[in-house]
Amino acid sequence: MNNLAPGSPAIEFRNVSYSVAPDTRAAGKNFPIISDITFSVHAGETLVLLGRSGSGKTTILKLINRLLIPGGGDVLVQGRRTTDSNPIQLRRGIGYVIQEAGLFPHFTVAENVALVPTLDNWPAAKISARVDELLHLVGLDPAEFAGRYPRQLSGGQRQRVGVARALAADPAIMLMDEPFGALDPVTRAELQREFSALAHRLKKTIVFVTHDIREALLLASRIVLLEAGKMVADAAPRDFLHLPHPEVRAFTSSISFEIPGAHS
Amino acid sequence: MNFWPYFLQHRAEILSATLAHMLLVVISMSIAIAIAVPLGMLSVHNRVLRSASLTIANIFQTIPSLALFGFLIPIPFIGGIGKRTAIVALVLYALLPILRNTFVGLTGIDHAIIESAEAMGMTKLQILFRVRLPLALSVILAGIRTATVITIGIATIAAAIGAGGLGTFIFRGVALVNDSLLLAGAIPAAFLALSADFLLSLLERRLRVN
């Protein structure tokens, strides 16, 4: 899948908009979720979509793997419009991790991780080798965890399994929707550090959604800030902090006003 | 009134009526499950089918059972006197609880699970069979349990159209104002309903995921 020249965009948004009808009975007016979004994500980059709740971050993510179809403009994944691709094939080539992991409660850890390889009919031996490899990669001992069910795991462990499952078929692109949002602060920091190291090592193209500016600064090679469905900033983390836009200031001030020692 | 001597004296007859009753219920429930579960599965992605099938099943549920048996008698092929007509009526009654629970079970699954299944590139059919159905099993079984208990009860009325079973004793007991006869039908029927309810609840608990 990674056959594009380095530097060419893995994902491209061209003037993309998306809106929903607020109520099917109220005819006519559609409520815009995002409007005129244009940016590209280069191969191997970790792009963080930052914004408040309802700013359209998740919508952008879902437009990439065609869970949603753009109302206007084009979304290109590896040079191809998502509307021209087979959605099933497109999604199998894109890893997806969400808050609370979305693991299947009736599947063991191993079966959850093996999901996409199983759907793609890999031979059994190759699947089980891959599962072991992935569990090691996310820091879970296969001997201990492979046979467990999601309910027998802690939140952090579930999220690790979620990452392993998304990596299973070695997708070039990973989409992550506040994957660490539901974790306690200590576990979250642990996973963020490990994930950041993993992302560098695996050279995946990652689009990461969060409302936590600290997480954005830690993980991003680039930050796109959204406000009410519009892009208001697109900058590397070190430049981001100095942008004058009021929404940027609102986010940066949310960390700079903390009193050391007073934060639990 | 002396129930026990009567019961012991007629135990062979009561046993065979109980078995006939069970057969009636098992056949009716098998047919109802074979109709309602696939119908519920098809309704997941078909809004028209969903409301149509639920409405029709609902209507059957509202018809008094004795009346439904009566209505069916003059209908060709499925009607007439005897077991076949009784089975048709029992199937119609059992449909609603199974259909409703199948649909609720299949659609009431945590949205995050369905969304990640879609995002992993599972087709609708794969999601239906590998995700929705296994997670809905205990809810579907709860519907089957409700339907079974209802069917065991209503099947006693089927004796009115000559379908046999434990209702035979009850109708005879009512006609002759004989409590022993009445109880010889009612007690085994109640026992059947309670045991079916208990056994199916065990199975239901085993199938529950979480």
Image (cartoon, coloured by chain):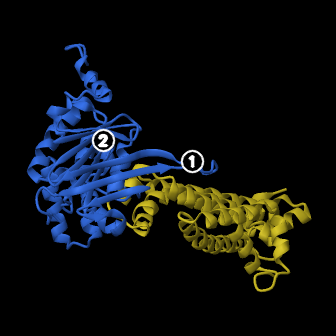
Chain colours: A blue, B yellow
What residue is shown at x 24% (from left), y 58% (from top)? A113
Residue A219: numbered disc: none
Q: Residue placed farthest to the left in the image? A: A201
Q: Is residue B203 left or right of residue A236?
A: right
Q: Chain of mark 1?
A: A
Amino acid carrying mark 2 in the image: Glu
Q: Residues within 10 Å of mark 1 (few under 14, many from 20)?
A: few
Q: Nearer the viewer, residue B131 or A66?
A: A66
Amino acid type, callout 1: Lys
Q: Crowding at label 2, few (<14), some or many (≥20) Cα neighbours within 10 Å? A: many
In the picture of the structure, the residue carrying the numbered disc 2 is A178
* Residue at figure coordinates x 85%, y 81% from the top left: B74
User: Vertical placement of B119 versus A55: above or below?
Assistant: below
Secondary element type, mark 2: loop
* Residue A170 seen in this snapshot: yes
Residue occupying image coordinates x 55% and y 69%:
B42
Residue A236 rendering spot, x and y as whole percentages: 17, 38
Q: Is residue A108 left or right of residue B52?
A: left
Quadrant of res B80: bottom right
Q: Which mark is residue A29?
A: 1
Which of A90/A191 is in front?
A90
Relative to A155, residue B203 above or below: below
Near-viewer residue (A52 or B152): A52
Among numbered discs 2 and 1, the one appearing first in the sequence: 1
The verdict on a common chain for dots 2 and 1 is yes
Chain of residue at mark 2: A
Instruction: Give the alpha-carbon distance from disc 2 to disc 1, as whole Å.
Output: 30 Å
Q: Quadrant of the N terminus of chain A?
A: bottom left
* Residue A238 occupies quadrant: top left
Quadrant in the picture for the C terminus of chain A: top left
